[in-house]
Image (cartoon, grey):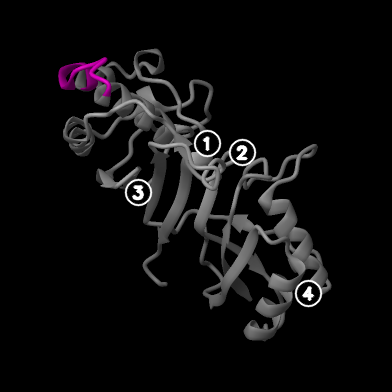
Amino acid sequence: MRYFIKLAYSGTHYHGWQYQPNATSVQETMNKAVSTLLNTEINLMGAGRTDTGVHATQMYAHFDFERTIDVPTIMHKLNSYLPKDIAVQDIILVNDEAHARFDAIKRTYEYHINTSKNPFLQEQSWHFHQPLDIALMNEAANLLLNHINFQCFSKVNTDVNTFDCTIYQAQWNQDNEKLIFIISANRFLRNMVRAIVGTLVNIGLHKITLNDFESIIESKNRDRAGFSVPAHGLYLTEIEYDYL
């Protein structure tokens, strides 16, 4: 039997989702917890990777288990066993062929910026106090929807077959002292969102123009794009499947 597990986590104390031999990851922590409670070795396959310090308000992973799970009981035990910065939200029985990573049809990220120093947001958003032209940043963000190849926003040494992504939404919202960038796509490249945000911040600072932004995308050159903003402002917020 195959199960999807839905969870959320604060990434502050983890070296990302993916298992690493010499660092604490969310995947390793979850594997240990589920294996302990089900009394068998469990290896979760996540819907994707999040980097060190990145948060997730919604993440899915799948695992196989030969017996029917009493979902309310196991969820309660898992949330009691897991550290306070990881929460299991649901466990769902799915088709044996279902795949948390390959079946995802849409993913959404948010990037959070706070424009005034707030001691309660230091690990949850990026403090950036310089004034930004949000209207111009939204004009630039809208241009992303006209493009497919985003190699200029990808890590240079990454093993992918294509740099093509379909972006469905990209916009900035302002709520008093908080700025939130929302971006949805069928897939994302490594470091893509943080590089896009850094480049859009340069737009908002009037360091580059909209024409420059188009030229950067068309160049397919990471060196032309902006800086990568800090990881702790980034959230994976939604993953969509046809069957959930």
Residue at 54% across, 40% down: 122
The type of residue carrying mark 2 is Thr
**Relative depth, front residue between 123 and 184:** 123
Residue at numbered disc 2: 52
Q: Nearer the viewer, residue 228 or 136?
A: 136
The three-letter amino acid code for the residue at tag 1 is: Ala
Q: Which residue is mark 4?
A: 38
Mark 2 lies on a secondary structure that is loop
Task: Reply above or below: 223 against 176.
Answer: above
Task: Tell which circle, 3 or 4, labels the residue nearer the N-terminal end.
Answer: 4
| Inter-mark Cα distance, 3 to 2 | 22 Å
Q: CA distance from mark 3 to mark 4?
A: 33 Å
Q: From this viewpoint, is residue 225 visible?
A: yes
User: Range of the magenta residues?
Assistant: 205-213
Q: Is residue 164 left or right of residue 123?
A: left
Q: Earlier in the sequence, mark 1 or mark 2?
A: 2
- Dot 3 amino acid type: Asn
**Residue at numbered disc 1:** 231
Residue 193 placement (x, y as % from top left): 40, 36
**Mark 3 vs 2, N-terminal side:** 2
